[in-house]
Every structure is written in structure tokens, then in C-alpha cells.
Image (cartoon, coloured by chain):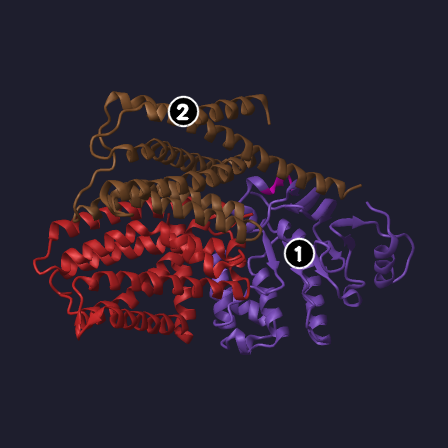
Chain colours: A brown, B red, C purple
Amino acid sequence: MTTAVKAQLAVAAAMFAAAPWVINAAPHEATMGLVYKIYFFHMPAAWMFMVAAIVSGVASARFLFAKRLASDATAVAAAELAVVFGLLALVTGPLWARKAWGVWWVWDARLTSSLMLFLIFVAYLLLRQFGGPGADKLSAGLALFGMANVPFIYVSVNYWRTLHPKTSVVPTLPVEMGVPLWFCVTAFLLLFLALLKMRATLERQRARVDALYLSYDEA
Amino acid sequence: MTAFLRVAALVVRKDLTVEVRSLEVVSTTLFFAVTVVLIFAFGFVREGAPMDGVAAAILWITVAFSGTLALGRTFERERQADTLRALMLAPADRPALYAGKLAGMLLLMALVEAVLVPLVGLLFQAPIFVAPFRLAALLGAGTLGFAAIGTLFAAMLVRARSRDVLLPVLLYPMTVPVMIAGVRGTAALFQPEPDLGMAQFWIALLVFFDVVFVTLALWTFEPLMTD
Amino acid sequence: MSDFTQLAVVQVGRHYGRRRALHDLSFTARGGDIVGLLGPNGAGKSTLLAILGTLLAPSTGRVEYGSHTSGDQGAALRAQIGMLGHDLFLYPELTARENLIFFGRLYGLAEAPAAADAALARAGLAGRGDDLVSSFSRGMRQRVALERALLHRPRLLLLDEPFTGLDQASSARLVERLREEQARGVITILATHDLDVVDGVLTDVVFLQGGRRVAVPPGTGGLRERYLAAMQDGPRV
């Protein structure tokens, strides 16, 4: 791990350690009381999921068209993080929903679109694992298509829903709640960047080990 | 441009010739589609009457399932004597090969839907003749979107391991907008008072989807198929 | 792209993850050469042929077709290459004539039906042109497949185990056909196990073992003796 990554992890860890107090300092929300505070983890997780998905899509495009091998490492790292943060968001989302609306799942546009995008990245990992040789290129194609699909998924799910009663996911936030939210977003972002760097480096090192095996073969 | 169309037409004609000889893919896909509709019927018909609004969903789910089957079978054929390699060896424009395969797939799906739509109309009392042109436009645009992505994925998986299960795993999440648009648009047409505006909205979305994804597929076909 | 008369393989390597299929391979071939790729199963012969046919890109090194490398040529280069794979590349549900016409048109031949008829005649199958390929024996399919590969008069001919499953007469016919193309100045690269058949036909030999080229041991002796000696203890090239 480089010093930069160590520093990022250290700050993120510190921020996560401090988070309970920061979140506690935020005022109670009128209708929901304490429980809404899961939102402070759900939102950043969802945002990191989106960011990871975009990073993976862009890196896949560079790998496929510009033939940059290093981009493949970034694409895989980002895809794995998309699955991790996506899972976090999809678990905290229903926990919130249960308290806010009394049901574990609602077919609202954002949640459903996130689920579909999450499935695309799970499919990416399955393809890489089980697709045999050459699967790195194929999964890059999948990530690229997934990226292109995001607006369509959102719009179609959104309009699919309009026949159902509307519930809003994002309440408007008074400014006292803004502070813990951005605190958590920063902590998540630092964690995401550190993990992305580490995972991508791991992937590149794995490729280097393969190259070493190959050159050892020559001795 | 003409070279592109010439190669695509060549591939379609070849696929048609091969298929006409045995009719294997057509007959098995048609039979499968009919069976799937019947299975849904057993699930959704209660006390002799179909549940409300299921016709549209059943139609599109059946299209998705039979399409996936047909895609698998068509590309399995190209694996047999490694003829897909022979196609890639030719000096022909690679995207043209893709376009030819896509056109062949569309013809097959059109045939399947020509049987499915009346069947669904019959079994679930769906008013398929109320707005036939819009229904045809929905089916056409939706099938094109599904087939465009499906043809690309099936081609790129030809040499992959676990290709049979990976095709649906990759294809279904990617074609969710097609399913949503198709089902909601068709449901809008099958309502007691058909909502033509709604259907038109979904048709427009599908057309836009088709433009984006056919273009993307044409761009990525060559890099994905070459090592 | 103009025609080329020389093929140069320059330090070509190819790996899949940790598995190295080819390592630092170099050789040259000119028009009229029939180069044999000999080696045990898994030596990398098929991989090398795929690279020469532009189906695979080398991981290291390059292939030069005349003065051009494969990277920049695309379709024009593919028009100069004819390949006969191990799986023959023929549609079993089509007739021999339909196969030839399809591929002829795909390669942009102006008079594909006429070329197909001529090809069938050269293959000695003029009477069987309208029979489905699935009804042919291995030898007959081989003949049609070879003519398919030669239909567009390629400059480079790549053959992967073409003698597999052929009887004496068919093998002799194949050798004769290869000599015809050789006289035309075609560069032929052929991978095979049938040492006795190709002994005397090959103008040059590349022995492959474990993805590397093995030196041809000096001295005379039939191809089989030299092959066995090379596989045993030939020094690496």
C-alpha cells in the first residue's frame, strides 16, 4: 500500500469511528425519529455505487477501444466495488423503507433502477469468473452496455411507476442534517477511492505475476 | 454502404437457406413459445377466467424466453464446423456480419410473434385488433432492441465457457427497459379504453433505445469478437 | 494493399494468463515455399496458424506480410489469406456448391457460381455439387474445404492438420493440389502429424515443442528420424 492509500484509509477509518457521534448530533426527524439516520449510510453508499458503476463503464470502454490493458484492472476493481456498495445500499434501503413506509420493498424508480444496475454488475462478475479465457473483453462489453443502459433503466422504471402511488425517497433536508450527510459522504468517498486503488493495484500485480511466470518459463 | 448491405444480405440468405432445409430452430422455438404461454395460462387463469391485465406480460415474457432459446440455437450452429471463424476470416466488414445475423433473428422472432399474438389474444381475451399498427410497432421496436443486444451477446459468448447459462444472465438485466416498455405499452393498448398516448410514449422510448443499442452493438462487435 | 511474396514471423509470442502457448518464434517463408509446422499436440501449431490468419493477435512480436504488419491491414490482408481449419469451415446443411458460392460471394468474387463450378471440378466432385455436405465423407469434405480456401486465389495458404482421416488416394490428391498452388507462388504453411506423407513435399520445416521452436538437427535422414531427434534433445532456437 502506498502512503497515499494508507492516509486515505486512516482518515476514512477515523471518520467512520467518529460517525456515530456526528450522526447523533443531527436532529431527530419529525415523523421518523431516530431510525431515519440509517439514511446517512444509505445515501453515500448509493452514490458510491453509482460512481463505481460509471468508473467501471468508462474503464471498460478504454480497455475495449483504446486497448489499454491497465484499464481492465480499474474496470474489475470498480465493478467489485459497485457490487459491494450496491449491496450496502440495497440492504439499507429496505431497512429504511420498513420504518418509513411499513414495507420492505417498494417499486420506486430509484430503488428498482439500482437493483437492475446491481444485477448487471453481478452478471459482470459471474462472466469474469465463469466465462473462461477472453472473458475480460466480454465483461468490458457488458459494462459498457450497462453504462449506456442507465438512463433507459431509470426512465422506463420511473414511468412504469407512475401508475402506482408515489412515495418520495429523498426528503428535503434542513441544513443541520446536511453536515452529518456530507461527513458520511466524504468518509465513504475516501474509503471508495482507497479500495479502488488497492484493488486495481492488486489486479495489475496479478497480471505482473502471470508475466513473471511466463518469463520464468524461459529460463 | 452497399458492400455492408450486400454482406448482410448474403448472411441472411445463407441462414434462411440453412434453416429452411431442416426447420429445426423455427419449429422448436414455436413449440416452446406455445408451451410457455400454456404454462402461464395454468398459472394465471382462475376459475376459467384469466386474471386482469396478464396478457401483455405473458406475451412479452414468452418473447424473451423464446428469443433466448433461438439465439442459443442459432449460434450453436455456427460453432459446429467453426464456421463463425470462417466468417471472421473473410475480408467482409465485421459489423455487416452482425447485421446479417440480427436480420435473420428478427425474421425468426417475427414469425414466432405472428403465432403468439393471436394465441395470447385467444387464450386471454386480449383485444389485439383494437390498435393493430401500434401493437405491431411496439412488438417490432421491442423485438429489435431485445434481438440487437441478444445477437451481440450470443456471438461474443460463442467461445466462452458456460455460455448456455450466461446468455440469459447477461441478457435479461440488460433488456429490462425493453420488457417494461413492451409490457406497459401493450397493456395500455389492451385496456378497455386503450391509452394510445401512453403506447406512443413507450414506442418512442423503444425506438430511441434501438437506435442507441444497435449503434453500440455495431461499434463493439469487432473488438469483442477478435482476440 | 499490394500482394506480398514474403511472410516473416518475428519473435512472436502468445500467452493466455499464465499459460504460454508460443514463445519467441521466428521464421520466414517466401512464395513457392511449403513450410511444415511439426510438433506434438499442444505444441502451439494451431495457435500459430490462427495468428498467421489474423484471427488472433500475438502477445509479443509481430508478423510481417511483405512490408506490412497485420495490425494495419484488416480486410485487404484477409482477402489474401486462405485457411483450412481442423473443423473444415463448411456448413453441413448446405450443398457443396452453395457453400462455395456463399464463401465466394463473401470474399467478393465477381463470378461466384462459375468459380464454384471450376472449384468443384478441381476437387473432382463436379457430379456431387448439389449434395449436402453432411452426406460427404471426410475426404470429400476436405476437398471441398480446400477449394473453398483457395477460391479467392490467396497469397497465403494455412492448413491445420489437412491429412487427418484421409485415405491414400485423397492424400495424394491433396499433395498434388498443394504442388499446383506452389507453382503459382503461393506461400503454404501446414501443420501436420503425418510425417510420411509430407516427407519430400515440404521445402522447409519448423519443429515446435511447448510453444518454442526446436532446432533441426544436422544430418540426413527422413523427416520422421529428424523429427524424433528434434523432439528428444534438439537445442532451443
Of residues B193 and B205, the one nearer the viewer is B193
Residue lying furthest right: C219
Q: Quadrant of residue B7?
A: bottom left
Image-based side of C17 in relation to B193, left or right: right
Residue B98 in view in this figure:
no
| Image location (x, y in percent) of residue C56 | 59, 49
Magenta highlight on residue C67: yes
Which residue occupies 80% across, 41% down?
A219
Q: Which residue is mark 1?
A: C46
The chain letter for the residue carrying disc 2 is A
Mark 2, Cα crowd under 10 Å, few <14 / some 14-19 / many 20+, is: some
| Image location (x, y in percent) of residue A94 | 31, 44
Q: Which residues are magenta?
A: C65-70
Image-based side of A150 in relation to A1, left or right: left
In the drawing, what numbered circle is on residue A145? none
Q: Callout 1, which amino acid?
A: Ser
Residue A46 in view in this figure:
yes
Magenta highlight on residue A169: no
Q: Callout 2, which amino acid?
A: Thr
Q: Quadrant of the N terminus of chain C?
A: top right
Image-based side of B122 in relation to B147, left or right: left
Question: Cα distance, mark 2 to mark 1?
Answer: 53 Å
Q: Which residue is mark 2?
A: A186
Of residues A1 and A116, the one nearer the viewer is A1
Q: Quadrant of the C terminus of chain C?
A: top right
Depicted C134 relative to depicted C65: above or below: below
Depicted B188 relative to depicted A197: above or below: below
